[in-house]
Image: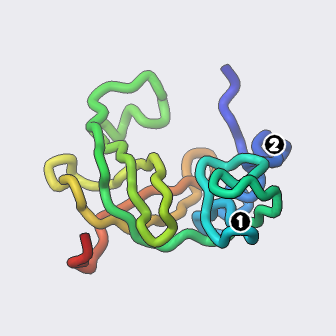
Amino acid sequence: MTPLTPAAADQHRDLAGYWAGLSAGELRAPWCSGCCRFTWPPRPACLHCGAADLGWERLPETGRIFTWTVVHYTSLEDFRALTPYVVALIDVPEAEVRLVGHVRADPAAVDFGTWLTWRVDSGGGGVPAVFWIPSPEERSDG
């Protein structure tokens, strides 16, 4: 199986805006101008109203852990040195989406509802990658 790279992803119209966002240091998702909502995962039409007029907008920087798992073993060479690491389903309430993400935190410090902030770095081999870290600010909402 060939890994997906930004060059290959740019050729898939549903993912091009995601990779362009990461290259600009932003986590972006499709935004529907018809119903004014984010839709995830990317697709040719809005999940909510079916409109095809989608653009890409920056997501809010914070989300909270809905659920997670700790990876202790991986066959992925680029991730072996990171074990154990956290993979979480992250609720971004301001955007009404949930994303799967790599959380850079001590697995013992992760819990349901932990607030996170996304960051983008160059990733392995210069390919931009998004990751999440515990948010420095405490939030009291839900």
Location of residue 83 with respect to 106 vertically, above or below? above
Residue 97 rendering spot, x and y as whole percentages: 49, 58
Task: Give the quadrant of residue 79.
Answer: top left
Q: In percent of the image, x 66 and y 72: which residue is there?
A: 36
The kind of residue tagged 2 is: His
Residue 115 is left or right of residue 21, and the answer is left
Q: In percent of the image, x 21 and y 47: which residue is there?
A: 107
The kind of residue tagged 1 is: Cys
Label 2 residue SS? loop
Residue 2 rendering spot, x and y as whole percentages: 70, 25
Dot 1 crowding, Cα within 10 Å, few <14, some 14–19, many 20+? many
Task: Report, in whole angstroms, how far the alpha carbon at label 2 lies from the one at label 1.
Answer: 19 Å
Quadrant in which the N terminus appears: top right
> In this figure, which residue is indicated by the disc labeled 1?
32
Q: How is the image coloured?
A: rainbow
Task: Give the quadrant of residue 46.
Answer: bottom right
The earlier-in-sequence mark between 2 and 1 is: 2
Quadrant in which the C terminus appears: bottom left
Q: 135 or 72, which lies in front?
A: 135
Q: 7 or 34, which lies in front?
A: 34
Residue 108 is left or right of residue 38, and the answer is left
Q: Which of marks 2 and 1 is in front?
A: 1
Dot 2 crowding, Cα within 10 Å, few <14, some 14–19, many 20+? few
Location of residue 21 with respect to 124 vertically, above or below? below
Q: In percent of the image, x 74 and y 58: which residue is there?
A: 17
Residue 61 rendering spot, x and y as whole percentages: 46, 72
Q: In percent of the image, x 45 and y 65: which residue is there?
A: 118
Label 1 residue SS? strand
Residue 19 is left or right of residue 78, and the answer is right
> In this figure, which residue is indicated by the disc labeled 2?
12
Residue 54 rendering spot, x and y as whole percentages: 77, 62
